[in-house]
Amino acid sequence: MIAGCVAIAYALREHFSMALALIVIGALFDFVDGMSARLLKVSSPIGKELDSLADVVTFGVAPASMVFAVCSSRYVLYPEALGVLSYFLPYLAFLLAAFSAIRLAKFNLDTRQSTSFIGLPTPANALFWASLIVSYQRVFYSPFANYWGLVLLLGVCIFSYFLVAEFPMFALKFKNLSWEDNKIKYIFMGVCIILLITMGISGIAASIVCYLLLSAVTQQK
C-alpha cells in the first residue's frame, strides 16, 4: 500500500518511470505476501482484506493517476468541438480505480477463482497502463496529442469492462512443474521474456495483451 501511495505521488508529478517502478515493487510484494504469511504461520482473515485494500491503491488508483496526469496535461489537447466537456474527460481515468475495487470485492466472494481468474486481474491491468504510459509518454505529448487523450480514455473504458467481465483467464499458479499441466503458463512466460528483451518496457504492455489473447483462446469452454 505504501508503494502504491508513493506511486500516486510520482504519477501526479508526471514522474512516470518512478511510478511504474513502485507499481512493479507493489506487484512483487503482492506475489510473495500470501506465501510469506503461510511460511511464517501468521495467515489470517484480516490479511485477505488488507491485501485487497492495498491492491485498490497500488493497482487501481496508482495507474488511474498516471492516465489522469497524461490526459489532464497542458500538452494534451482535445477537439474544440467538445467545448467545456474536455475539462472533465480526464477524470474518466479513475474508472480504473472504481472497477478495480469492484473486481477485488467480487474476487473475495467468488469461490470459482481459486485456481484461475474471471476477469482481468488488477496487477495485470496496472502493469499494462503504467508501462504503456512510460513507453509512449513522448507520443502522448506529441502534436497529435489531442487525439491520444481520447484514445487513452477509450482504452480505460474497455479495460474497466475487462476487469469485471465474466471472462475466464488462467492464473500463474503451479501445483507441479510438469509441462503437460502447465504448458500454457510456460508458453506465456517464454513469450513474455521474448517481448521484454525485444521491446523493453513496452514489452510489459504487450505481454498483458498476449495474456488476454491466450486466455481467450485457451480458457473458453
Image (cartoon, rainbow, N blue to C red):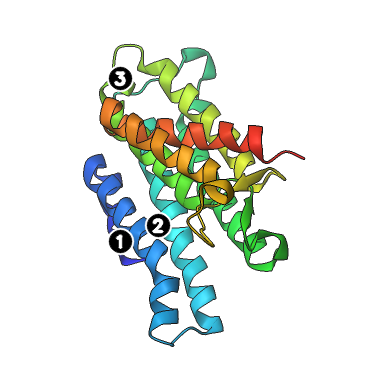
**Residue at the disc numbered 2:** 58
Please tell me which residue lies in front, 145 or 184.
184
Q: Secondary structure at mark 2?
A: helix
- Return the x and y of residue 10 as percentages of the image width and height: 25, 49
Residue found at x 29% / y 29% = 135
In this rendering, position of residue 97 left or right of residue 206: right
Contact? badges 1 and 2 (CB < 8 Å)? yes
Amino acid at circle 3: Val
Q: Position of residue 101 (x, y in %)?
A: 57, 57
Q: Quadrant of residue 65?
A: top left
Left or right: residue 142 versus residue 216 is: left
User: Which disc number belongs to residue 139?
Assistant: 3
Name the residue nearer the viewer: 217 or 10.
217
Q: Assess whether mark 1 and mark 3 are in contact (beta carbons under 8 angstroms).
A: no
Query: Separation of disc 1 and disc 2 at Cα?
Result: 7 Å
Picture quarter with the N terminus: bottom left
